[in-house]
Image (cartoon, rainbow, N blue to C red):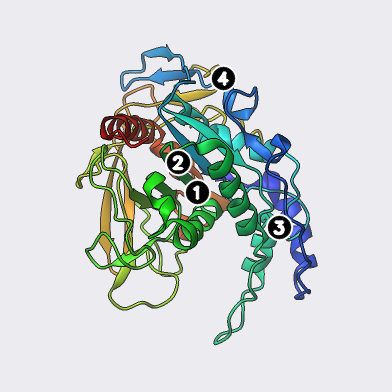
Amino acid sequence: MFRTLLAAVLGVLLAGAQAFAQPAAQPTYPPNDYGDKANWLCWPGRVDACASDLTTTVVKADGTTSTEAFHGNPDAPIDCFYVYPTVSRDPGVVSDMTVKPEETNVVIQQAARLRAHCRLYAPMYRQFTLAALFAAMMHPPAPGTTPPPRPQVGYDDVKDAWNYYLAHENHGRGVVLVGHSQGSGVLTQLIKNEIDGKPAQARLVSAILMGTVLVVPDGKDVGGDFKSVPLCHAPDQLGCAIAYSSFRETSPPPDNSLFGRPRTAAPGMEAACVDPANLGGGPGPADSYFGALLSGQALGAFPWLKGASITTPFVSTPGLITATCVHAGPFHYLSIHLNGDPSSPRTSDIPGDILVGDRILKEWGLHLIDANLFMGNLVDIVGAEGTAWTAKGAH
């Protein structure tokens, strides 16, 4: 089985972990000026990461291939506001505001394709870094104690960027909030504090919160983290939320999983699971778009097709993946089934596991590819939402 390796960042993480072994006083951070477009990773109409080449090689089950071009829509009827996950390799607890390859690469993988149906805004923000995350994993709090609070600056930055966008760019347009991991956590907080039950909720087309735990009452769509933002059940439903964390069917969440259940004991509550491949429920085909070199240069290119190299930036494998939400004990998660054919020259596996040495971190599931697994589905959903927004006349 091929797995994704984090060797490219482990050196940074291990070095940084020692610096965070002892708690330190939190510094004060001045606010960013989001009127300065340099503080945005992506901005509509600009030549930046979100305008990158997204050409895809489509590899069918029989091994035949075709090339799929991508074209954004500069006249899209709605906007997308994207907050990226924990990617910064900066050596401190909090990242700086310089755009580096890790921010560029992740927005290409997770959000740039949404430009087919929305104008895409993506602020830079001073996030909790990979080094700080790894340090927290190496030095967990003693039993019965609580971990020190994370710096608030990342949330404050995103809130400031959101308020700038609303004041200067929104002009009454609908907006899809999109995030993954830390980005989803920040957006969940933003929705709680600034949108849910407030005037800005009228602008909310949907919230796509990948790789996170969104808490809802057992078997219900609203309550828990959000008081009036329900879960989505149809592609043209407006004002709703999609949330999930993905795990291989053959490797369900272990007891120490970071995802799939509320982080703190909450009787009567569960983690939301909304399947982008079938919002109505039940198994659905995942329309995946993987970076052709998603494995990273440390391991070389993933063998998508026997005897052939993929030369486009992306690859898709229609029919390979089926997804369905599963309840298993306390967990509620998106189970990923592979419809591989060993006789086909096309791969029967996918990358996406996190390894440290030879050990798979099963508690993370397929966290690294939560977005890639369903990017085509999400693009289609945003397209249907834009059509519904226009039909509603919600301008």
Task: State which quarter of the image contains the C terminus.
Answer: top left
Q: Which residue is mark 4?
A: 53
Q: Secondary structure at mark 2?
A: helix
What amino acid is at disc 1? His
Q: Are marks 3 and 4 in contact (CB under 8 Å)?
A: no
Q: Tell me the CA gap for discs 3 and 1.
A: 18 Å
Q: Which residue is mark 1?
A: 180
Q: Position of residue 82 (x, y in %)?
A: 52, 42
Q: Position of residue 380 (x, y in %)?
A: 33, 30
**Is 239 rendered above or below residue 75?**
below
Q: Earlier in the sequence, mark 4 or mark 2?
A: 4
Q: Residues within 10 Å of mark 3 (few under 14, many from 20)?
A: many
What amino acid is at disc 2? Ala
Residue 191 location, quadrant: bottom left
Looking at the picture, tell me which residue is in the foreground, 171 or 332: 171
Q: Position of residue 220 (x, y in %)?
A: 23, 63
Residue at (65%, 76%) from the top-left corner?
Answer: 148
Q: Tell me the CA gap for discs 3 and 2.
A: 23 Å
Q: Residues within 10 Å of mark 1 (few under 14, many from 20)?
A: many
Looking at the picture, tell me which residue is in the foreground, 259 or 60: 259
Q: Which residue is mark 2?
A: 371
What amino acid is at disc 4? Asp
Q: Are marks 2 and 1 in contact (CB under 8 Å)?
A: yes
Nearer the viewer's eye, disc 3 or disc 1?
1
Q: Which residue is mark 3?
A: 131
Q: Is residue 249 visible from the viewing direction of this image? A: no
**Is 230 rendered above or below residue 82?**
below
Q: Position of residue 39 (x, y in %)?
A: 70, 40
Q: 14 left or right of 207?
A: right
Q: Secondary structure at mark 4?
A: loop
Q: Earlier in the sequence, mark 3 or mark 4?
A: 4
